[in-house]
Each structure stands twice: as structure tokens, then as C-alpha cells.
Image (cartoon, coloured by chain):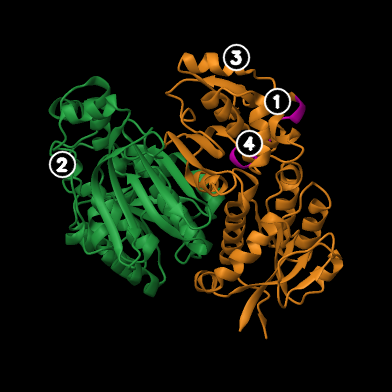
Chain colours: A orange, B green
Amino acid sequence: MATVKAAILGFGTVGQGIYHIVNERKEQLAARTGAPIEIAAILVRNLDKPRPDTPGVLVTDRFEDIFAVPGLEVVFEAIVGEEPAGTYLEQAIKAGCHVVTANKVMYAKAGSSLEALARELGTGVGYEATVAGGVPVIKTIENLNLANEVTGIQGILNGTSNFILTKMRKEECTFADALKEAQELGYAEADPTNDVSGFDAFCKLMILSGLAFGEQPEWERVPMDGIDNLTLDEVVDADRQGLRYRHIADVRRGEDGEIQASVGPVLIGPDHPLYGIDGVDNAVAIETAYAGTLTAIGPGAGMYPTATVMVEDAAVLLLKHPFRKLVTE
Amino acid sequence: MATVKAAILGFGTVGQGIYHIVNERKEQLAARTGAPIEIAAILVRNLDKPRPDTPGVLVTDRFEDIFAVPGLEVVFEAIVGEEPAGTYLEQAIKAGCHVVTANKVMYAKAGSSLEALARELGTGVGYEATVAGGVPVIKTIENLNLANEVTGIQGILNGTSNFILTKMRKEECTFADALKEAQELGYAEADPTNDVSGFDAFCKLMILSGLAFGEQPEWERVPMDGIDNLTLDEVVDADRQGLRYRHIADVRRGEDGEIQASVGPVLIGPDHPLYGIDGVDNAVAIETAYAGTLTAIGPGAGMYPTATVMVEDAAVLLLKHPFRKLVTE
């Protein structure tokens, strides 16, 4: 039967989620896109590390082996860190593959050049998973771009920060204690700097800016603050006044035509669309010219939420671009 | 220059919104889809009724005149009531046109046969505007259908009912007084039966069921209740306990494989995703197999929110289907 050959770069949590969903949804994907997707190869860093069984799949630690797969059409990238992920995706596009990524730091920097390269070579790039995990923010803005106009975006884009702020408010515990619990629950990394400093939310905001406004502001001019300087007293005082600190990433085009963005804790009242968003959820309020404010809420991270939008991205790209490399065996 | 010819059936609030947006966004639509859309003809019921100026557009009260437009490719339907809207759309599809509708009663009944006809004839149907106005619920579920699975849907699908419930709770006014204000503000029709009886939400729920589960439950087996039997005492008592009545439409597949649906007021607590949705907004919480619960919130009605998703639908259909009828003048 003719199949679409795909590879997964990186076989951690998200990579394994992709493998699982592609196999569990094989018939559904075939019915919706016209052909089943087959994971033909997986790139790992360390071949000796234990990992789930993947019968019939080439597992390799050499990137060049991935491209030796005949008819490779889709590359899922689920590697942590900017490089070599960016270089791999560039090479994948040059090899005529669609690429799908969840890598926000890499994509905030290299996204527009990868998209331009893909456009030139007739392939596609999927990056829904880079912003707000399972919440379909990218596709919503892509649709708004057709006939509406995004005038501003405000988002809770870092679930770890929101979990910590929620816990500090509800349980009156310190930042350090809340962070510790976030780490124990697997929400925060061992090194939580990117999350609590605001850099993770910043990268996602830059990706949204590029999509909604066609450009990013100069990075060094964007005020960026994390939640790590908020004291328990400040959070509790706000709560007594019916207000809440939320870590909000904001971007809009100013009256002078310049993009204005900021990332940091903001004190908001009950009328704000992000007031009620508690815990690890992400939420994005998209202000539009014709449809008021549209708010999307959901899980901002996690194995399956991230993996499922990556598989969706691949399906959308396969539907947009006629199959060029179906491999019949 | 080559243009896509479109017609608008019905020139009330929504029809005028479509006309306005298509003209205001002409360049954007051309850049995104490959050719500008031109409103070539408008069907009105009464030619003598005053209406905005539409220079160069054929305005007619005869449906056959619409199809005399050479190369007509898109038909926007913004007529109130089931018929003749359904018949017109069927004829439009048979004439090779893409159709875009906001007509929920008609679409709940005839949607699946219109879609089958369009599929057979190679055209497309857009119906995002039938459910939750400007909130992109249909497109979100279409994407989830690719590789995820909707397991349940709960929605506040009637803005008028939500406005009335919000006002009763916040201002402790009776149902009758709240309804009167909704009518004065233009949220409720002169005859508000469909809104407050639950039938409007019911029709939207049936459309969502068809999309998410591939079928609708038997209509007469779905319990349907409106907000018109709720007393002020009940609403105020609930509020004092920290609970809220929301008019919720719910659909899911039961363990026996049967679709289970209900429409009516439900008492919910602060942990429910629809607890915080006040006023005329609509909100839909979509429960999924892989991405937890995704909630989308926004304006459920209104001239521009409804019109803009209809123009988006047309753009999506034009992108999906190669232009077949570009008219060069």
C-alpha cells in the first residue's frame, strides 16, 4: 500500500507521543489525507539509552541515515535546544520534505527564513506546537489573516509560571515552594530559568508577532520580566483586592506603526479575559478588527497535546501539497 | 483583472457585513487567495426597501437572475429562515458554486445532504458562521478530526440566553426585565422564542454533533429546555452558594456507542470551564482524546463577527479548490 514516509528527530516525550499517535491513528490519517503515514526512521542522540520498542523502524544516531530513507516526505522535529535542530530542518526542507516543529527558541529566530526556504522549494512548515501546546492559536491566526486583521494579542504562554502564580495565590505559598512543586509534578524543567524568567513566553510571543503582523519587534527593545521577582505579599495583597497577577505576553501595532511588545507580570481585574485562567493552562486572547476578542484556552504543554498538533500539522501540509513521494511497497 | 464572482442572498445585517468586508479587504483577499473577490449580485426580497448603495452590483429580487451572472463561483447565504435558503443553496451547488451559510436551522437539517452534494460535484460548503458566530469552532473541530478525536462538547451557544442569565444574576432582575433589555440592545429578536426556548442552541449542537461524531442523535430524543422557566430566586440562591446557571448544550458518545445530547440550564461551579463566561459571548469547551479540553470564547453573533467568518470560509474554499471560473474583464 502507498504510504507517506516520515521521520522523527528526537525521541523524548514529544517524539514518543508522535510515534504513538501516528500508529494509533493510522486509519484515520489515511482516510482524512489520502494515505497512511509511516514512521520510517527515528534520530536519537544515544543509541544505548533504553527506549520504547519501535518494530521495523530505523533508529539511528546519524542524521545522514535519515535522508537515506527512500521517499522521505515529512520530518517531525522534537529536539530540545536551537541547534542542531535548526540546521536539520533547513536540510530537511532542502531535501524536499515538509517539516513540523515544536522548537520555540529555534523557531522564534529561524522561523521566517525556514518558511521562505520552504515556500521557494514547494514544501511546507508546521509550527502550531511552538506556541501554547495543544491550543490551536497558529491556525486561528492564519485563518484570521485571510479576511480579518489581528490588532493585538495577549497571552498566558508559559504554563509553569501560571501554575506557580496560581499556587502562590490559592495556597499562600512562596515562589520557591510553588516552583518546587511544579518541578515535582514535571511541569518545570530541572533548570527552570527559561520558564520563570519570561524567555519561553517571549519566544512564543515573537512567533505570534511574525504571524499576525508580518514582523517581530527588535528583541532587545522588548521589556521582558519573569515571575521570579514577585513576592508572596504582593500576590496575596492583590488577591484581597480582587485582582490577580498574571504573567502576560502582549503584542500589538502602535499608532506609529511600530510593533510594541512586553512580557511580564500584570495585575488584572475580573473583566480581563485572562483573569480566570488558573493552573498549567495556556490562554491567548486575540483582538481582531471584525470579531472582537477571541480567546482560546487549553493545555500549553505535555506529551500528547504537543504531539497531536504536530501530527495535525503534518496532515494539513499533506492536504495542502499534493503527494509527491508516495512510496508503494 | 481576473476576479472571483460572488453573490449575496439576503441583504440584511449579515449580508451588508459581507459586502462591506469583501470590499474593504479586496487586496488582502487577493493576496491570500490569488484573486480578488467581487460581489457581482445581491438577492433582496423587496426591491423598494431602502438599502446601502452598491454601485455596479446587480440587485434583484429574482433568484434566476443570480445564476445569469457569468462565472459565478461563490454564493453567500444570509437569509433568515429555512426556506427558500435550503433550496437556493442546493441549486447553487448544482450550478457549480461554493456556498457559505450562517443559517443554523436550515443547516442542522440539510447540512449533511448539502455537503454530500457538494462533495459529489467538486464544490465546497462553508458553515463556520452557523455555530458561535465569530468563534472558529467548526475549523477547530475539522482540524481535530485529522488526528485527534472529539470525545465531548459543552457549549454556551446562545448569547441572548447567556446575557439574560448574567443580568438576572448580577442585577437581580427578573427574566422578563432582562429579556426586555436584550431586545432593546438588539441581542434578542422581536420574537425571542428560538433563543429562550433552547431551539437555537439545539440546532447549533446538532451541527457540532454531525461534524464531531459523524452523526446527529434523533432530535426528538434530545431533552431540550430553555431559560424561560428559571426564576430569579433560583438564580440568586445559586449565586449565594457560589454556583451559576448556564444554558449549556452538551453532546458526547455514550458507552453504548449512542450519541447523547442535552440542552438546558445547568448549575455549575467555579471549576467548570464555562463558569466565567458572562454576557453575550459564546463559549465552546471541546473535550479531546489527546489535548485535554480546548475552550474557545468570543462573540456569538453580530454583523461583523458573523460576516467575517463567512468571508474567511469563502477564502478557505477558494484555496482548497483550484479556481475554475476566474472571470477576466
Seen in the picture, residue A186 relative to A19 is either above or below; the reply is above
Q: Mark 1 points at which residue?
A: A224
Q: Position of residue B53 (x, y in %)?
A: 30, 37
Please give left or right for residue B4 compared with residue A214 in the image: left
Q: Which mark is residue A160?
A: 4
Which residue does the numbered mark 2 point to in the structure image? B48
Residue type pointed to by label 4: Thr
Residue that carries the numbered disc 3 in the rendered image: A233
Dot 1 falls on which chain? Answer: A
Which mark identifies residue A40?
none
Q: In this view, does A267 lie to the left or right of A218?
A: left
Q: Which of marks 4 and 2 is in front?
A: 4
Helix, strand, or loop for circle 1? loop
CA separation, marks 2 and 3?
Answer: 68 Å
Distance CA(mark 3)–CA(mark 4): 20 Å
Labels 1 and 3: the sequence-earlier one: 1
What span is in magenta? A210-220
Q: Residue at x 44, y 52 (%)?
A: B287
Looking at the image, is B73 positioned above or below residue A266?
below
